[in-house]
């Protein structure tokens, strides 16, 4: 398989944002997982946590294979963010919309992955939002504005395949437009 | 977990080229270490848990049974990571200078792992 027919997209974000679930929702095979028992129940009350990566894959029908990498969320695993981010064509940042720290989390992860994957597009997916939480999406959009990042922000349920596909389709559409603009600029 | 620290200290004393021994939880937290309170230890703990998890994922994909240890040899020394049987996903990371013979280090580390297993079961 040639390198041009393999794309790499990274799912990033804090612990409990739904990265492992999102990849499992769309992957063509059961994702490779590195989940371990979570001893840090104060940060997020869940049974297990990713300590190295998640790896799934989705075929686009034209022979292109998109590899879906999930990062661990905690700072102590930030060395994995650098490793996983290398060569990514785009980043999907997932946030827990029920967390008061969501805008700060967005700032942290957007700044970090902007450095790791410069010039690559971002998509932001905010989960666990209630219908009356529209202001939280606006807050996220303001954070991106302040950082000078142009990225769409979606409310998503990462358990739903169609929601995760929306994020992936949007990212791929942005890349397609950018590639055609570059091609036009070069005549 | 004090007993774990004592076992690590005894191990490092008996194997003088060992520069760091860290007992780590499956999710990357330092449980015990020798020498204690080194600035690098939390990162080594997190990295060793990631490496342990990745090596387990790799052996699963390859259809191999439980992996015993992961050995990284460099020009300057060796890093060895192994699970501690009978514990809830604890692993042991050992860093040694190149003076240490790999076979001797592996033998000593397995003995340490057994001692930790016995000690932590009590």
Image (cartoon, rainbow, N blue to C red):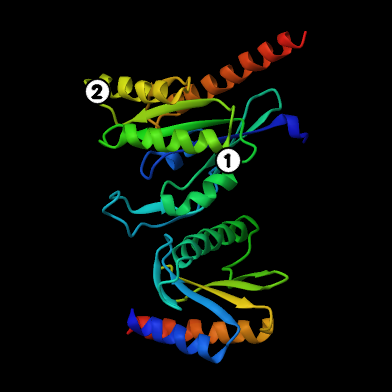
Q: Which marked residue is nearer to the observer: mark 1 or mark 2?
A: 1
Asked if the residues shown at circle 1 and circle 2 are in contact, with their CB atoms under 8 angstroms apart, the answer is: no
Q: Nearer the viewer, residue A100 or A55?
A: A100
Query: According to the image, label 1 marks what residue?
Result: A85
Which chain letter matches label 1?
A
Total number of numbered discs in the rendering: 2
Residue depicted at 43% across the width and 61% down the height: B28
Q: Earlier in the sequence, mark 1 or mark 2?
A: 1
Q: Nearer the viewer, residue A51 or A181?
A: A181
Q: Disc 2 on helix, strand or loop?
A: loop
Relative to A48, residue B75 above or below: below
Q: Looking at the image, which residue sits at the far left?
A: A132
Q: Are marks 1 and 2 on the same chain?
A: yes
In which quadrant will I find the N terminus of chain B? Answer: bottom left
Q: Position of residue B75 (x, y in %)?
A: 73, 70
Crowd band around label 2 with a 10 angstrom C-alpha radius: few (<14), some (14–19), many (20+): few
Which chain letter matches label 2?
A
Q: Quadrant of residue A28?
A: top right
Q: Is residue A137 left or right of residue B108?
A: left
In which quadrant will I find the C terminus of chain B? Answer: bottom left
Q: Position of residue B44 (x, y in %)?
A: 50, 65
Q: Position of residue B89 (x, y in %)?
A: 43, 67
Residue depicted at 65% across the width and 87% down the height: B104
Residue depicted at 56% across the width and 38% down the height: A116
Query: According to the image, label 2 marks what residue?
Result: A133
Relative to A96, residue A177 above or below: above
Q: Looking at the image, which residue sits at the far bottom?
A: B14
Q: Quadrant of residue A62?
A: top right
Q: Is residue B65 visible?
A: yes
Relative to B48, residue B35 above or below: below
Q: Nearer the viewer, residue A172 or A22?
A: A172
């Amino acid at each position: 398989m040639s390198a041009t027919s393999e794309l790499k997209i990274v799912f990033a974000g804090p612990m409990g944002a739904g990265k492992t679930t999102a990849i499992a929702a769309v992957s063509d095979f059961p994702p490779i997982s590195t989940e371990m028992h979570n001893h840090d129940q104060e940060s997020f009350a869940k049974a297990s946590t990713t300590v190295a990566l998640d790896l799934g894959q989705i075929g686009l029908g034209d022979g292109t294979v998109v590899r879906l990498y999930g990062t661990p969320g905690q700072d102590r695993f930030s060395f994995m963010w650098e490793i996983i981010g290398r060569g990514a064509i785009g980043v999907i940042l997932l946030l827990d919309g029920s967390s008061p720290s969501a805008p700060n989390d967005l700032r942290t992860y957007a700044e970090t992955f902007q450095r790791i994957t410069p010039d690559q597009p971002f998509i932001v997916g905010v989960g666990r939002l209630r219908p009356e939480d529209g202001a939280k999406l606006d807050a996220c959009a303001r954070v991106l504005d302040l950082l000078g990042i142009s990225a769409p922000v979606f409310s998503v349920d990462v358990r739903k395949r169609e929601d995760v596909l929306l994020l992936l389709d949007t990212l791929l559409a942005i890349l397609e437009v950018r590639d055609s603009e570059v091609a036009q600029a070069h005549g | 977990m004090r007993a774990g620290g004592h076992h690590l200290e005894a191990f490092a004393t008996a194997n003088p080229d060992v520069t760091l021994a860290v007992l780590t939880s499956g999710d990357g937290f330092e449980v015990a270490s020798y020498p204690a309170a080194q600035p690098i230890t939390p990162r080594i703990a997190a990295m060793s848990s990631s490496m342990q998890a990745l090596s387990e994922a790799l052996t699963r994909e390859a259809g191999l049974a439980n992996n015993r240890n992961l050995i990284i040899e460099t020009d300057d020394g060796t890093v060895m990571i192994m699970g501690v049987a009978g514990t809830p996903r604890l692993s042991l990371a050992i860093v040694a200078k190149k003076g240490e013979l790999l076979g001797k280090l592996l033998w000593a580390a397995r003995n340490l792992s057994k001692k930790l297993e016995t000690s932590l079961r009590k």
